[in-house]
Image (cartoon, rainbow, N blue to C red):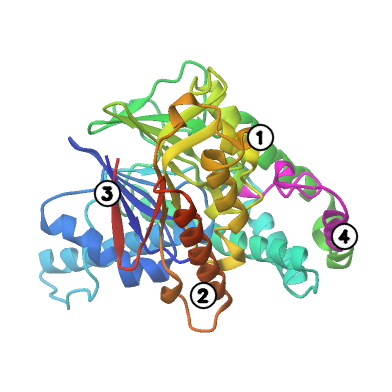
Amino acid sequence: MKLHIFQSDKGDCLLLEGNNGGRVLCDGGMSSTMQQYVRSELSKLRGQGESIDYAYVSHIDQDHISGVLRLLEDELLWRVYDHNQQSGNPSAKPRVPRPPAIGGILHNAFRDQVGANAGKVTDLLAAAADVGLSSTNPRLIELGSEMQNIALSVPEAIRVSHLASPKILKIPVNRLPGQTKPAKLLMVRARQKPFQVGSMIFTIVGPTADEIEQLRDGWNLYLADPENFNSLKKLREKLEKSADEIGQSSMTQSEWESYKGVSVPNIASLMLMVEEGGKRLLLTGDSQQDIIIKGLELTGYLKSGSCHLDALKVQHHGSENNLDEAFCRKVSADHYIFCGNGEHGNPDPRVIQAIYDSRLGPAGKRALSATSTGRPFTFWFSTTSTAQKAGSKERKAFSAIENLVASLAQSSAGQMSAKFNSNAGITLSI
């Protein structure tokens, strides 16, 4: 397999290619980086007569879905142009490169996950985001930013579904190879078989029905109380109280940033194990460590209590809330892929250190898989500090990451190396 790691701002954007066929776009990053870096690279595929079998969107967050939306909008421009040409109404060619054909989309649509209250959820998130972002509490500010991201993502996710529909671009959603029955939400199901794309085998590792139900029920139960939805004053008080509790307690991401039963879409990330020729890559979206472990256990990848992968796409941009020492001990890899540009401090230096310690640290922190012992490993980063705006928090944060990684590599006696993406993309051969 080859994994092309693109510049994607604070988000994820990867292109996975099988050695003997098959091509999957894994999230699209931000629309701005899709326009600046990625779409010109992808358009080369069309020029070569190649296509993308699937565009996989792990979840609806803007930094995962907005780049995919940009691609679909570009294709719509070109199809309108084609129609005008065929109808004898010549028009100017679109000024954007034409994307490769996309055979299908793997994406659990927000409306399917949440149900009839999708519009109310968006309004609630926007209100809560305003409260959080106007706070002086750093934890509440971060929570507000998260809610704002989701609020902006919902209409983009709806737009993706609309453009892919049979009336417009006619791109099937969640229709797996060989599937004849109606498409449905993608999740871990009993007796579910892997599916093949080219020479690659895909197994759905998450979410389970539990995460989908928690997401849906949490929102709907919360919105069933008119006081929760209609009173911004009450919402502000409750959010501020929640933030205080976060600051005073050991509340962690294992509670999924849950507030009154409302969970962010990260917990419902679509996760995939990809295998080819004995090699394994785990795509985690923005999921959380306990959920990933649960999915690996249910799908048989943790029969011995641990597993060693060829490559791991580190969850949620390397946030300290989504990865802990226990996870690092159970799941190890030859290659760790970090997507993130320093926003919110991600990738977090504590995560980088935890992964390093799981390979070369004290015995009590070492990875449990015997396969990992003595094996060299590499950290892959989707960007560099110099790609961030001069004087920005992101540049400062990412510069600190580069310094830490350089120090760790130097102390690793050649066991650890690092690759930073200073161009449109870099390629990892798995």
Residue at the image point whose x is 55% and y is 68% from the top? 400
Q: Which residue is mark 1?
A: 213
List x then y, in percent, for residue 303.
Answer: 53, 17
Horizontal arrangement in the rendering, residue 386 relative to residue 50 (left or right): right
Q: Which residue is mark 3?
A: 102
**Mark 2 residue type:** Arg
How would you rate the neighbour count of disc 4 (Cα within 10 Å): few for under 14, some for 14-19, many for 20 or more? some
List x then y, in percent, for residue 100.
Answer: 22, 55
Residue 255 located within the stretch drawn in magenta: yes
Asked if 143 appears above or below 275 in the picture, the reply is below
The span shown in magenta is: 238-265
How would you rate the neighbour count of disc 3 (Cα within 10 Å): few for under 14, some for 14-19, many for 20 or more? many
Say which of 259 and 249 sits in front: 249
Q: Is residue 401 visible?
A: yes
- Point out the image quarter for the C terminus: top left
The CA span between labels 2 and 1 is: 39 Å
Q: Which residue is mark 4?
A: 244
Residue 395 image label: 2
Task: Identify the mark nearer the N-term, 1 or 3.
Answer: 3
Badge 2 marks a residue whose secondary structure is helix
Horizontal arrangement in the rendering, residue 84 relative to residue 397 (left or right): left
List x then y, in percent, for residue 96.
Answer: 24, 72
Task: Identify the mark nearer the N-term, 2 or 3.
Answer: 3
**Mark 4 residue type:** Asp
Residue at the image point whose x is 64% and y is 43% from the top? 324
Residue at the image point whose x is 36% and y is 66% from the top? 34
